[in-house]
Image: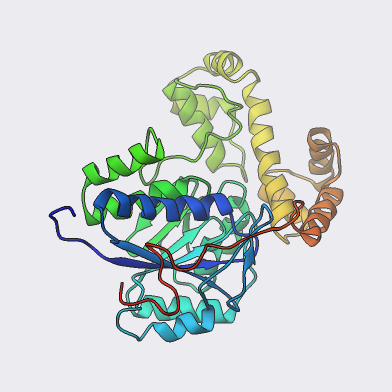
């Protein structure tokens, strides 16, 4: 046993239908490895679902749980089983509005618990108004619809964000990075480094690190001026700015910008800008209920016909056909056949219905 004061945290992880198994397992694995490094059960967790029944992830694997949401709400007032962190594990699509879930989140905030949104889980926190004025990380695919729905939240396309007692991550292995920050907060970077060594993680991203560079197509971009122009394009998709103005703000000429784009990205600035606007429109078509004409205007197109033509050239279908296909895919559910996976009871680091104090 390491000679140090052990911080004890209990995480309640709510699994929404279609949650990301990668993000969920990344978060739990960070806690498990921290316990292994500390040679103590410093971190514990229990898994929650709406009705206490197993939940199927986006890849079709089904995970068994410890308790229902109503039972979890009852544990908020009980010493020893009182969680310190409430986590909403989402996936590729926002969870349906859920009054019981929203009530639990409000109870947790009233008791000053950390609220954590993983992937689309941040939508559930935002739906309650508890994320208003907070900085939240949103996955780039969900970002356009999130911004449209929650203008009072400062949404950013970063790997993860920690804004006071509200934490959020874009999903995937960014959940590991964010949960390692809990270890750093409770202990130090040396312990966190050993956790990363065990996980064979070479680098942990910091809060605010970008998820990706839009449409970078794997290119390694090292030109600061080019990065500034791309970021300006990203901020002005609804009202496109002339290339000359963007070039001037980066202390470059138009010809320099065109040459750099051609060399490092392989297409002209105008084409890249158009593809960014079309990508945002595509994501809004797939992930929002906004009328297509409003999506066209929100992405800087002067007319619905111009937008429809450009969209079809890019995606080989009309915007309305793309939306119909997306609706049908969501109705069909996971393509993979569900495989049932039980967590094997209440093992080390887990707290179940009959567990003792964390």
Q: Is residue 109 above or below residue 218?
A: below
Task: Report the side of 236 relative to 337 (left or right).
Answer: left
Instruction: Determine which quarter of the picture holds residue 254.
Output: top right
Tell me which residue sits at (32%, 61%) in the image: 43
Q: Nearer the viewer, residue 241 or 138?
A: 138
Position of the C terminus by quadrant: bottom left
Q: Is residue 178 above or below residue 198?
A: below
Q: Nearer the viewer, residue 94 or 42?
A: 42
Q: Nearer the viewer, residue 305 or 53?
A: 53
Tell me which residue sits at (84%, 38%) in the image: 312
Percent position of residue 39, x then y: 25, 53
Residue 151 appears in view: no
Residue 29 appears in view: yes
Tell me which residue sits at (35%, 58%) in the image: 163
Percent position of residue 110, x then y: 36, 80
Task: Report the side of 53 relative to 338 (left or right).
Answer: left
Q: Nearer the viewer, residue 244 or 276?
A: 276
Tell which residue pokes out farthest to the left in this image. 3
Position of the N terminus by quadrant: bottom left
């Amino acid at each position: 046993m390491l000679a140090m004061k052990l911080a004890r945290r209990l995480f309640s992880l709510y699994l929404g239908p279609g949650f990301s198994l990668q993000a969920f397992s990344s978060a739990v694995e960070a806690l498990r490895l921290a316990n292994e490094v500390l040679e103590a059960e410093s971190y514990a967790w229990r898994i929650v679902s709406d009705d206490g029944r197993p939940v199927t992830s986006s890849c079709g694997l089904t995970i068994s749980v410890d308790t229902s949401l109503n039972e979890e709400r009852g544990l908020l007032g009980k010493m020893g089983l009182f969680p310190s962190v409430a986590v909403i594990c989402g996936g590729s699509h926002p969870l349906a509005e859920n009054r019981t879930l929203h009530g639990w989140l409000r109870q947790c905030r009233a008791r000053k618990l950390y609220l954590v949104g993983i992937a689309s889980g941040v939508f559930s926190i935002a739906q309650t108004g508890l994320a208003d004025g907070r900085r939240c990380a949103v996955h780039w695919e969900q970002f356009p619809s999130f911004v449209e729905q929650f203008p009072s939240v400062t949404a950013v396309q970063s790997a993860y964000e920690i804004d006071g007692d509200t934490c959020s991550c874009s999903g995937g292995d960014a959940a590991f990075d964010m949960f390692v920050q809990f270890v750093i907060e409770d202990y130090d970077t040396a312990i966190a480094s050993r956790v990363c060594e065990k996980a064979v993680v070479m680098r942990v991203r910091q809060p605010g690190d970008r998820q990706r560079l839009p449409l970078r197509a794997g290119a390694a971009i090292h030109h600061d001026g080019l990065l500034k122009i791309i970021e300006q394009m990203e901020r002005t998709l609804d009202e496109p700015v002339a290339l000359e103005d963007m070039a001037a703000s980066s202390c470059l000429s138009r010809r320099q910008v065109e040459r750099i784009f051609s060399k490092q990205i392989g297409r002209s600035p105008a084409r890249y800008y158009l593809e960014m606007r079309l990508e945002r429109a595509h994501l809004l078509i797939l992930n929002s209920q906004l009328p297509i004409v409003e999506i066209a205007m929100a992405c800087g197109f002067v007319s619905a016909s111009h937008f429809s033509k450009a969209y079809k050239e890019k995606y080989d279908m009309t915007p309305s056909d793309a939306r119909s296909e997306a609706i049908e895919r969501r109705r069909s559910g996971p393509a993979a056949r569900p495989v049932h996976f039980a967590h094997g009871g209440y093992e080390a680091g887990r707290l179940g219905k009959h567990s003792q104090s964390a």
